[in-house]
């Protein structure tokens, strides 16, 4: 568990490179908006891109593919996820890896926050 008083820290107070990124509460990075999907890239570098998504109930992403490996992690809510034709219900704590080019789609069954990690370049 992250200490809540640490918060999000990209760099220390003095401007120098650090070897870590801490986000103590990924869900706080986006505000779920009525009838919308919102997203925010929270890390990009070292072959990783991490984006926090907020989906209102009923919001969806139609079937698509990405060229990189991807990991989906549900922080809160419920996603009805389809990957390679298999339907999955993903709730808090669920972790899903997809190979490059895996066809997938999703619908938020309730307000949902999700982390998406894209791996490779």
Image (cartoon, grey):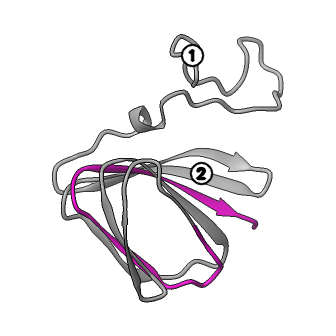
Q: At x 83% / y 32%, what residue is drawn?
A: 19
Label 2, on which residue?
50
Foreground pick, 84 / 55: 84
Label 1, on which residue?
3
Look at the image and give the residue range highlighted in magenta: 97-121
Q: Please name which of the two marks, 2 or 1, marks the residue nearer to the observer.
A: 1
Residue 106 relative to residue 5: left or right: left
Quadrant in which the C terminus appears: bottom right
Identify the disc placed on residue 29.
none
Vertical placement of residue 4 versus 102, above or below: above
Report the predominant secondary structure element of the magenta stretch. Answer: strand
Q: At x 67% / y 73%, what residue is drawn?
A: 68
* Mark 1, secondary structure of its residue: loop
Q: Residues within 10 Å of mark 2 (few under 14, many from 20)?
A: some
Q: Earlier in the sequence, mark 2 or mark 1?
A: 1
Rendering quarter of residue 66: bottom right
* Mark 2, secondary structure of its residue: strand
Rendering quarter of residue 28: top left
Does the magenta portion include 73?
no
């Amino acid at each position: 568990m992250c200490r809540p008083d640490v918060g999000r820290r990209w760099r220390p107070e003095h401007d120098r490179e650090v070897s870590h990124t801490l986000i103590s509460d990924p869900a706080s990075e986006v505000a779920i908006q009525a009838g919308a999907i919102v997203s925010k890239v929270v890390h990009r570098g070292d072959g990783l891109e991490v984006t926090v998504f907020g989906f209102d109930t009923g919001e969806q992403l139609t079937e698509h593919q990405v060229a990189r490996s991807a990991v989906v992690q549900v922080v809160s809510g419920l996603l009805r996820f389809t990957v390679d034709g298999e339907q999955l219900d993903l709730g808090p704590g669920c972790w899903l890896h997809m190979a490059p080019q895996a066809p997938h789609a999703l619908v938020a069954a309730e307000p949902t926050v999700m982390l998406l990690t894209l791996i490779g370049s």
